[in-house]
Amino acid sequence: MFMFIPRQPCLLVLLALCYAASPSDAAIVSDFNHVESCKDSLYMGTPPRGITTTHLKKICQYYDDRPRYVTLYDPVRRIPIYSAYTFKKTEASHRMDFPWMYEPQLAKLDGSDNMLPYPTGYLHMKFEDSQAVLDDYSDVVLYERGQLNPDQHQSDPSDRAATYTLTNVVPEIREFSVGAWQEYQERVRVRLNNFCRGTAFIVTGVTTKGNTIRRNNQDRLAIPEDLWSAYCCSDYDRNAPHHIRTLFPAWAALAKNSKEVNLVHEMSMWDLESYLKQNMEVDLNLQIFYENCASPSSLPASLHHTI
């Protein structure tokens, strides 16, 4: 009887293909733009370029077995450098109440890609070296847990729940968090609701200057010096009033994480990137959005805001 026995190299190739297709360890990735599930959160599937810090972790934020957004995370300072997400139109501006979660892949504690609710008792000590834990915020009355991807910018309950991970959170001065910054987030929500006709991509991040929250005589969390944010919507309402059209296709904002001097300054992408080149670990090629969110319109760039 003739029997076909596959050669060993073929078997190895088959195993390699199966492994590559497996979703395991998809939460921590080597490159956002090389993982299909992460690319949807980024304009043209391309993350911000020019960030030179080498120890940062790229997290594809999974919740309920689906990727929701991406975060560039600093496990040394235990805060996100930025979160990038797609804005979802919503009528609700109030925050929801979901349990806080952590990222098991940062500590390699669990085979799941999904963010998980914080455990009870002292189990968090197993992963507190790699990320922030609830105890870091428990005795700091000056600070709020500020979401870089705010739940007010999401509509689906699962997308909103996914913003409640401490890998998406930085310490924000309370007066700033519930005041000027929250007002800015609401202003952007209304603006994109009304005038962005396509998909809006948002990147929100921080700068730091060395100030930290301490616990048990150890530096635990870096305190942001600035918060910055930028959106990109290349398909916008070209019949909007002129003062609105000047805020598209891309616009940005910058503010001090401060109790008093904390006004949010809206500005061009060029102005924001110029500031970040002086205040972040980036090179001169820093670019938040691919090709600066160039509009796909066939009109010359000089006419984008005049029609």
Image: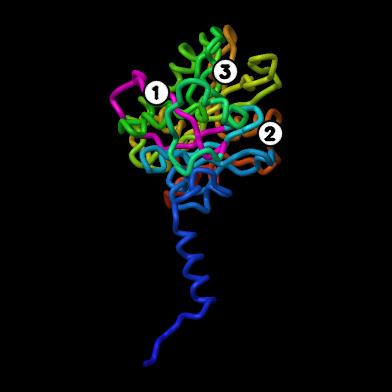
Residue furthest to the bottom in view is 1
**Distance between mark 2 and mark 3 Cα atoms:** 30 Å
The residue at the point 33 percent across, 33 percent down is: 158
Q: Nearer the viewer, mark 2 or mark 3?
A: 3
Residue furthest to the left in view is 91
Above or below residue 135? Residue 155 is below
The secondary structure type at the circle numbered 1 is loop
Q: Amino acid at mark 3?
A: Asp
Residue identifier under label 2: 277
Residues rendered magenta in the picture: 82-107
The residue at the point 42 percent across, 85 percent down is: 4
Q: Nearer the viewer, residue 184 or 128?
A: 128
Residue 239's quadrant in the figure? Answer: top left
- Residue 289, how many percent across, how many down? 53, 42
Residue 87 lies in the magenta-colored region: yes
Q: Which mark is residue 136?
A: 3
Residue identifier under label 1: 99
- Residue 109, how many percent across, how many down? 53, 38
Above or below residue 261? Residue 70 is below
Above or below residue 148? Residue 15 is below
Residue 116's quadrant in the figure? Answer: top left
The reply to whether dot 1 and dot 3 touch (C-beta < 8 Å) is: no
Residue furthest to the front in view is 1
* Figure quadrant of the N terminus: bottom left
Q: Amino acid at mark 2?
A: Lys
- Which comes sooner in the sequence, label 1 or label 2? 1
Q: Nearer the viewer, residue 298 or 168?
A: 168
Residue 278 lies in the magenta-colored region: no
Q: Amino acid at mark 1?
A: Pro
Q: Which mark is residue 71?
A: none
Residue 28 visible at all: yes
